[in-house]
Amino acid sequence: METVKQLYPILCSGLGLVQRPYSIKLQPDAVPFSLQTPCRVPLPLMGKVKEEIDHMEKMGVITKVEDPTEWCAGMVVVPKKSGAVRICVDFTNMNQAVCREKFILPSVEHTLGMLAGATVFSKPDANMGFWQVPLTEESAKYTTFITPFGRYYFNQLPFGIASAPEHFQKMMVTEVTSGLAGVLCHMDDILVWGKTQEEHDVRLHALLEKAQKAGITLNIDKCEFTCHTVRFLGHVISAAGVQPDPEKTSAVQEMSAPTNFSELRSFLGMVKQLGRFIPNLAEKDKVLRDLLSKKNHWYWGPEQQTAFERLKTELSSTPVLTLYDPNSELKISADASSFGLGAVLLQKSNAEWAPVVYASRAMTVTEQRYAQVEKEALAATWACERFSCFVLGRSFELETDHKPLVSLLGGKALDDLPPRIQRFRMRLMRYNYKITHVAGKNLWTADTLSRAPLRASGAHAGASLLGDTNIYVDSVISNLPVSGDYLSNLRDHLKADSACAALMEFCRDGWPDKNRLQGVLKQY
């Protein structure tokens, strides 16, 4: 890594800028949308917001707007771990009119086939990718957004534009990786490989030289150089060959055996949904189906366990589990139970939807107290992020069996959403999805996985979300213009107030039925 810094100092410093600007194309019948008033910003964060906007303006990423513009979007603020804030813009209305680019990628089979004999690998990472792409003057005005300090537009391609990921992919291929042997680019994932150390080094330096010439800079802290094992597109790649990433199937492989009729019925529903790819399915699941007969009592013995394990193996291997194709239609099914999240990435193969990756995780204690709509929003957001390496830059369908989620994560304005849903929506802004409602009876796979979640990953996944919440609260509190003694006194008085004490208990342990609330509590 130090050698890379010494040989390519420009490549490892600051924010790069490619030479060719990007033009955002809008449909001819696009109706401009312009917000007249800024979205609300918590007063304690106002100074941090101004500081970040001034920093972005100094970097040349944004420019203050004085003239009228047809388009003007809203701004949303997200606190960061460092205490600073991130500026996000809600381009929902404009994205409905953005013309998409179609960029064809080579199939994964073709790509993985080229890795035969490779023993050394590197994965460079582009620094703040989209911001390295300049916008034309006309396109910059489309990105105008309003803040409490006036209007600004982006000089560089911002996050949240529907066509941004696919253009970035196209730019990286045409400007950086095209014509280079032993180099592959998929969105912001770049892979360099060689059969020997010498071959790898020659290819890596060729890539770095071309990237520096194109104006790209790297996030050196996230780069992986000279590795003997790497993960790429759902596979583990090493000198031993290419193997499916165990994480793709662990949600199914580690599923516990059913303990009652309801759990068995859910599992067999998933098997039936995906079972068209399993040869002789009727014979393989007969032992389990017979158990569902009303005349039978619940019994789980060695024969049932063997059939269960065999079906899990069938669901986790070819031909049920299909190889990812970057040019096929994609769909994510996500669901939440009372204690877990489940999801499956499906790909259209020969007119049939086949699974590519399974995923599940347990909810944290805090997440289990969420309202159901928040649990479903969490499931959808987590699923997209979990499958990000497959869907980022692609258009895909997002399935949910919770109908209110279609508008909340679909077209409703960010500023009109409850805070927690708003945060989920902002995390989804970089994805190009169309959310659709599907009846619960047709969402067997995600539903089954959510009811048998992996426990090991739950704490880590939930900690990230809980950390975001704590960062926001701590940021607001630390910037309040009041003393610590005043806050301590206020906290004591709130605990002493019966109504406030009850409200804190409800927020912590869950809200009772509205009809059971007494007196002043009903207004909450």
Image (spheres, rainbow, N blue to C red):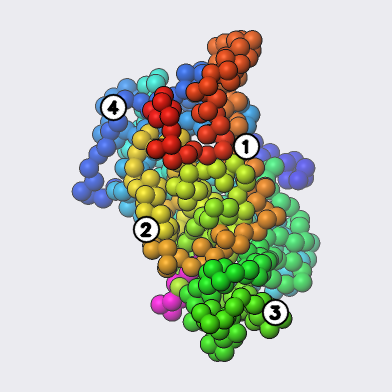
Q: Which label sits in the foreground, 2 or 3? A: 3
Q: What distance separates the C-alpha of mark 4 from that of mark 3?
A: 67 Å
Vertical order, 430 against 474 (above or below):
below
Q: Nearer the viewer, residue 358 or 140?
A: 358
Q: CA distance from mark 1 to mark 3?
A: 43 Å
Residue 114 visible within the image? yes
Looking at the image, which is closer to me, 243 or 24?
Answer: 243
In the displayed structure image, the side of residue 282 where residue 228 appears, left or right: right
Q: Position of residue 336 (x, y in %)?
A: 51, 55
How far across and how far down the image is residue 472, in percent?
56, 30
| Residue corresponding to mark 2 | 436
Residue beneath label 4, please?
36
Residue mark closest to the camera, 4 vs 3 = 3
Task: Name the image quarter holding residue 263.
Answer: bottom right
Name which residue type carries label 3. Gly
Note whether 304 is above or below 280 in the view shown: above
Pointer 3: what residue?
A: 301
| Amino acid type of the residue tagged 1 in the rendering | Gly
* Amino acid bearing label 4: Gln
Q: Secondary structure at mark 2?
A: strand
Residue at left offset 37%, top offset 58%:
436
Q: Position of residue 113 (x, y in %)?
A: 63, 74
Earlier-in-chain disc, 1 versus 3: 3
The answer to whether residue 104 is seen in the rendering is: no
